[in-house]
Image (cartoon, rainbow, N blue to C red):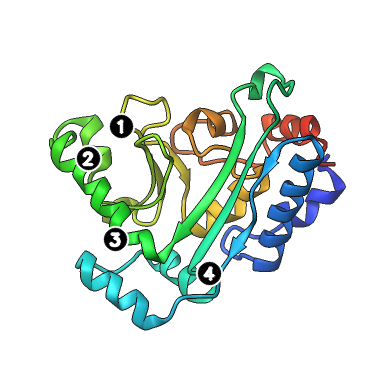
């Protein structure tokens, strides 16, 4: 049975995002974590970008931004920041014991720089397209740096176009995992869990396998909601 306060968020369709519900849920998480004694940063949703701003970035990148990400910049926000930390020594069940924070961010002003850095990893460390590990780093658009050398990315390859893929620089278990089938899907599903992570070990308990994506209705998700009192 779904917790009553989460039903309206969990019922949002896979390809339909209500911005008001996303913002409301993120705010609810910040209130919840703050009540637990955690550290919550200010939620930022700046005004949408202009088409001219997008075109400047695309000219520098020499390719068009992924469609859904582009639409979010143009219609939702050019700059989003959501971040929280659980209090030290907060008791967690074994299934979700690695969780300590939540993080979602994107910014039009950092699009070029973050992808320049990602490309640097490809050129200097993961150049071999025939190597299975290296290959994951290729044909990706990075939209969020995890802060440890890893990235959240959007697949640009035709056979996996639009999928959200985790890029690990140091053999992380989540390397190559599909977090969602689309950027809209990521916003719909990951936000329901408070965007736990972005390190892979924090959100992996909510993935059935490498291609399933993050599932906000799985048993570990319900355990997480109950543990932090999001009922």
Which one is in front in this view, the residue at disc 3 or the one at disc 1? Answer: 3
Distance between the alpha carbons at the discs numbered 3 and 1? 19 Å
Q: Residue at x 55, y 75 (%)?
A: 47
Q: Is residue 130 left or right of residue 186?
A: left
Q: Residue at x 48, y 34 (%)?
A: 199
Element type at mark 2: helix
Contact? badges 2 and 4 (CB < 8 Å): no
Distance between the alpha carbons at the discs numbered 3 and 4? 17 Å
Quarter containing the N terminus: top right
Quarter of the view holding residue 99? top right
The mark nearer the N terminus, 1 or 4, is: 4
Element type at mark 1: loop
The mark nearer the N terminus, 1 or 2, is: 2
Task: State the residue position of label 4.
Answer: 77
Q: How would you rate the neighbour count of disc 4 (Cα within 10 Å): few for under 14, some for 14-19, many for 20 or more?
A: some
Is residue 129 among what the camera can see?
no
Contact? badges 1 and 2 (CB < 8 Å): yes
User: Mark on residue 169?
Assistant: 1
Task: State the residue position of label 2.
Answer: 121
User: Mark on residue 111?
Assistant: none
In the rendered view, would you say 30 is above or below 87?
A: below
Rendered location of residue 121, percent (x, y): 22, 40
Distance between the alpha carbons at the discs numbered 1 and 2? 8 Å
């Amino acid at each position: 049975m779904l917790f009553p306060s989460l039903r309206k968020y969990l019922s949002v369709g896979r390809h339909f995002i209500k911005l008001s519900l996303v913002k409301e849920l993120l705010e609810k998480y910040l209130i919840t974590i703050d009540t637990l004694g955690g550290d919550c940063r200010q939620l930022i949703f700046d005004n949408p970008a202009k088409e001219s701003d997008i075109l400047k970035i695309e000219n520098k990148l020499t390719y068009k931004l992924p469609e859904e990400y582009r639409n979010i910049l143009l219609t939702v926000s050019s700059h989003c920041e959501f971040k929280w930390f659980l209090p030290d020594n907060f008791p967690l069940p074994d299934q979700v014991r690695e969780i300590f924070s939540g993080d979602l961010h994107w910014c039009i002003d950092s699009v070029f720089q973050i992808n320049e850095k990602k490309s640097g990893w490809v050129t200097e460390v993961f150049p071999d397209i025939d190597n299975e590990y290296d290959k994951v780093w290729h044909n990706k658009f990075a939209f969020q740096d995890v802060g440890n050398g890893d990235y959240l990315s959007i697949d640009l390859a035709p056979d996996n176009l639009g999928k959200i893929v985790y890029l690990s620089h140091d053999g992380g278990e989540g390397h190559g995992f599909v977090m969602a089938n689309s950027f809209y899907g990521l916003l719909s599903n990951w936000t329901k869990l408070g965007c736990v992570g972005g390190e892979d070990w924090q959100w992996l308990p909510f993935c059935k396998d490498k291609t399933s994506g993050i599932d906000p209705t799985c048993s570990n998700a319900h355990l997480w909601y109950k543990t932090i009192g999001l009922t």
